[in-house]
C-alpha cells in the first residue's frame, strides 16, 4: 500500500513482491483488502 500511495505502478509493486503479472497479484490483494488495487486507491483518495 505504501508503494502504491507513493506513486508506484501496480505492475511495479507486483514485480517487487515476486508476482509475474498483475493478474497473479489480484487474488491476494482482493482477499486481503476486499477490492482491486485501483478501486482501493480510488476509495482512499475520495474520502
Image (spheres, rainbow, N blue to C red):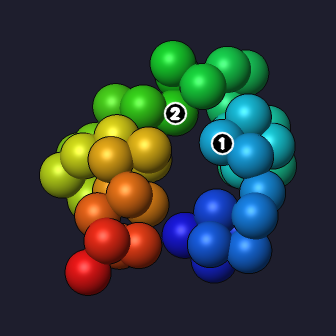
Please tell me how crowded label 2 is: few (under 14), some (14-19), or many (20+) other residues with Cα within 10 Å: many
First in sequence: mark 2 vs mark 1: 1
Mark 2 in CB contact with mark 1 (< 8 angstroms): yes
Residue 41 seen in render: yes
Query: Residue at (34%, 31%) from the top-left corner?
Result: 27
Label 1 sits on residue: 10
Left or right: 41 in relation to 40? right
Question: Dot 1: what SS?
Answer: helix
Label 2 sits on residue: 25
Q: Looking at the picture, tell me which residue is in the foreground, 41 or 23.
A: 41
Left or right: 28 in relation to 5? left
Query: Residue at (44%, 44%) from the top-left corner?
Result: 38
Residue 18 position within the rendered picture, expressed as x and y whole percent measured from the top left: 74, 39
Q: CA distance from mark 2 to mark 1?
A: 9 Å
Please tell me how crowded label 1 is: few (under 14), some (14-19), or many (20+) other residues with Cα within 10 Å: some
Left or right: 32 in relation to 16? left
Amino acid at each position: 500500500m505504501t508503494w502504491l500511495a507513493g506513486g508506484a505502478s501496480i505492475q511495479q509493486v507486483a514485480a517487487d513482491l515476486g508476482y509475474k503479472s498483475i493478474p497473479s497479484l489480484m487474488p491476494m490483494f482482493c482477499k486481503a483488502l476486499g477490492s482491486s488495487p485501483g478501486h482501493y486507491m480510488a476509495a482512499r483518495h475520495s474520502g
